[in-house]
Image (spheres, rainbow, N blue to C red):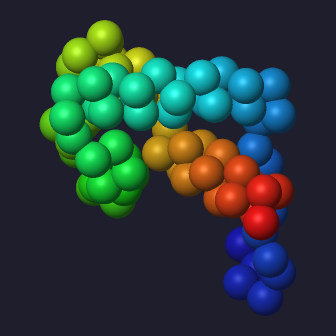
Amino acid sequence: MDFNETQQYQFGVDREEYIRSVITTVYAALKEKGYHPISQLVGYIMSGDPTYITSHNNARALIRKVERDELLEALVKNYIDNN
């Protein structure tokens, strides 16, 4: 590996809509249970600890089907695209 070259990370475009659906569903489940969804999602992405996500409406199992780097990339992309 040449450390002078920039590595490229390729995000699966076909998963973009699926990831958006997962984030939306998990966000709604957290909100329904009275949690602060943004804080809980950040806690999960930073730590990888699934207990930050409620099991309500199968949200915990659902979010674990998406890699944390994919979640982060989708959130950053959405932020950049909308600001």
Residue 42 seen anywhere in this rendered image of the structure: yes
The reply, left or right, for residue 45 in relation to residue 33 is: right
48 vs 64: above or below: below
| Point 77% across, 66% down: residue | 83
x, y percent for residue 73: 64, 52
The reply, left or right, for residue 28 in relation to residue 36 is: right
14 vs 57: above or below: below
x, y percent for residue 25: 47, 22
Q: Which of 77 and 82 is in front in this view?
A: 82
| Point 71% across, 51% down: residue | 78
x, y percent for residue 28: 40, 26
The reply, left or right, for residue 80 in relation to residue 43 is: right
13 vs 44: above or below: above
Tally of numbered tags: 0
Residue 44 seen anywhere in this rendered image of the structure: no
| Point 55% across, 44% down: residue | 71
Q: Which residue lies furthest to the bottom in this view?
A: 4
Q: Quadrant of the N terminus?
A: bottom right
Q: Nearer the viewer, residue 50 or 6?
A: 50
x, y percent for residue 2: 76, 79
Q: Residue furthest top?
A: 57
Q: Nearer the viewer, residue 24 or 18?
A: 24
Q: Which of 77 and 14 is in front in this view?
A: 77
